[in-house]
Amino acid sequence: MTPRAILQIKNLSKTYPGGVHALRGVSFDIAPREFAAIVGLSGSGKSTLLRCINRLIEPTEGEIFFDGCSVTDLSLSELRRLRREIGMIFQQFNLISRFSAHTNAIFGRLGVIPLWRSLSGFWSKEDEDLAEKALCKVGLGHKMGRRAMNLSGGEQQRVAIARALNQNPKLLLADEPVANLDPALAHSVMQYLELANREFGMTILCNLHTVSLVKRYASRVIALKQGELVFDGSPEAINEDWFRHVYGEDCHGVA
Amino acid sequence: MRIGFVMSMGRIATVSPRKREMARAFIFDWGLVFYGLLLVWHFGSLWRGEAAKGALPLLEISVFSTLLVILATWYGATPGRKLLGLSQQVQPRWYRLLWIFFSLMIALLTLVQGWRATQVDVAALLNRDGFDGVLRIGSALLSPQLSIFDKAIRALIETIYIALMATLLAVPVAFVVGFFGSQNLMTVTRWGSFVYSVVRFFLNLTRSIEPIIWAIIFSVWVGIGPFAGMLALALHSVASLGKLYSEQIESIDQGPLEAITATGAHSLQVVWYGVVPQVFLPFLSFTIYRWDINVRMATVIGLVGGGGIGTMLMQYQGLGRWNEVGTIIILIAIAVWAMDFASAKLRAAIS
């Protein structure tokens, strides 16, 4: 039914050295151009799952295929090539705060820019133009020269999105992108993810806390509970029973 | 782990934490009991009127304290186990009193032994002749001999340059060493852990030898003079700056590193853009502070032949020319105060 999956996760497990089982045998496929939301309580393994996909965290067991090639057995340079194709956005924005929004956007292409150029800070015209374009896409063309530390939370997250867009990835991982923002800003940030999905055809895998955002933006929802996949389907299925199933018996209140 | 630059969330634990804590508690208790028994033996032999010159019965006391600690650990809580929170049970009254008595005895005997070891002599402090001597020197110090002013200024400038060169030479080395000595960047791979351990070992070794001893070594190597002093300070600065730098790197926010790594960047780019911007200002601040410390240390090093104002001070002190010594001391105090002031202002401006 689904077209050739861009991302396949097979029986993925992660056990941390302390003995914590963050993921237990998680499997699912993501089709190109999907907007998938991953939900679950804190500590249910959502962040670990995202970080296993670009191997910021080493999975203990299982396989991951991205665009047809196995992620789990790659050399260091192959891994870097893979990471270029996968953008990432974080809860804490993770910008380099002393640098301008423009330079931060340039950093999206560090994987492609020659080493000497990037270390000397001697960016090419192309690097600068692409970063500027990416910032304009998130509506920050006028704040290019501002240092990241002097921008508001919402603006910082938009710069982070510009950095990811500038990377021009096939897949965009977003780890709680709006958890640190107030609800009004949350929508503005989510809308840029939607833009990346609809206009630029990026596949999105996004950890979310808020069920209303899942219903509004996602085309698919995957739920984790104590490291296990407990639901995989359409956001339409979200109701009071679903909520208790995912978040536990004494939780209620679907937004 | 096959790849070099993954930021894992957890760290590999080989020994269970509880066992490691128990071992720590044992070492602590053993040290305490060993020291206590040594004190008891020492005062015992003094009391029996034996000269405290013979060999210390280290082996016997070691064995005896090992047995005692094993016994105490088997019976109940010990200070080490309490300290590390390994024992929550209430102990019998007599057992607690025993430890309290033992600790108080150690504290008391330590004070007594400290008094004896430093040969405290109140009579010497209040001796009339000694007091007159101090007054003579004191009054000479307060009437500086300005004829050597010019020469002293030149020596002082030499000292400041010795400190500056030592700092400048140390910074690039310490910068590189700091990265190789930081736990968060290095212990990700096995090879990295090895390099980290070696670097940390040499940093600790170099730092535990005082600059004044390095100055003696270098003055034998390259001859007495500013060059020897500069080398000694540079070496010690590498060790202490390297440690400060690496600790700063260990306390950075991992987030930006993760973000840069996720773009597919090379490890060098990750360090350059993920780490360096976060540590640059603290590094600069440490470096200025180090220069300030080096000016003070250069003076001391001069006393053992490291050149500059310290050597000059040593010469006049040897000749007993206290007026000249006074001039030099006043100049050193002014220079140190000025450096201290300037470095504090500079560091405040940076942060």
Image (spheres, coloured by chain):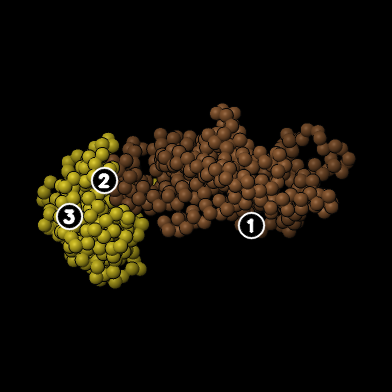
Q: Amino acid at mark 3?
A: Glu
Which chain wears brown? B
Q: Amino acid at mark 2?
A: Gly
Q: CA distance from mark 3 to mark 2?
A: 16 Å
Q: Which of the 4 image quadrants contains residue A223? A: bottom left
In front of the other: A135 or A99: A99
Crowdedness of circle 3 by 10 Å Cα count: few (<14), some, many (20+)?
many
Q: Is residue B209 left or right of residue A2?
A: right
In front of the other: B159 or A77: B159
Q: Which residue is mark 2?
A: A121
Helix, strand or loop status at disc 2: loop
- The chain carrying label 1 is B
Q: Which residue is mark 3?
A: A132
Q: Position of residue B167 (x, y in %)?
A: 47, 42
Q: Is residue A50 left or right of residue B75?
A: left
- The chain carrying label 2 is A
Q: Residue at x 45, y 46 (%)?
A: B245
Outermost residue toward the top in this view: B221
Q: Colour of chain A?
A: yellow
Helix, strand or loop status at disc 3: helix
Q: Is residue A8 left or right of residue A60?
A: left
Q: Which residue is mark 1?
A: B89
Q: Amino acid at mark 1?
A: Gln
Helix, strand or loop status at disc 1: loop
In front of the other: A95 or B119: B119
Q: CA distance from mark 2 to mark 1?
A: 62 Å
Front of the two marks 2 and 1: 2
Q: Are marks 3 and 1 in contact (CB under 8 Å)?
A: no
Q: Residue at x 53, y 54 (%)?
A: B338
Q: How many marks?
A: 3
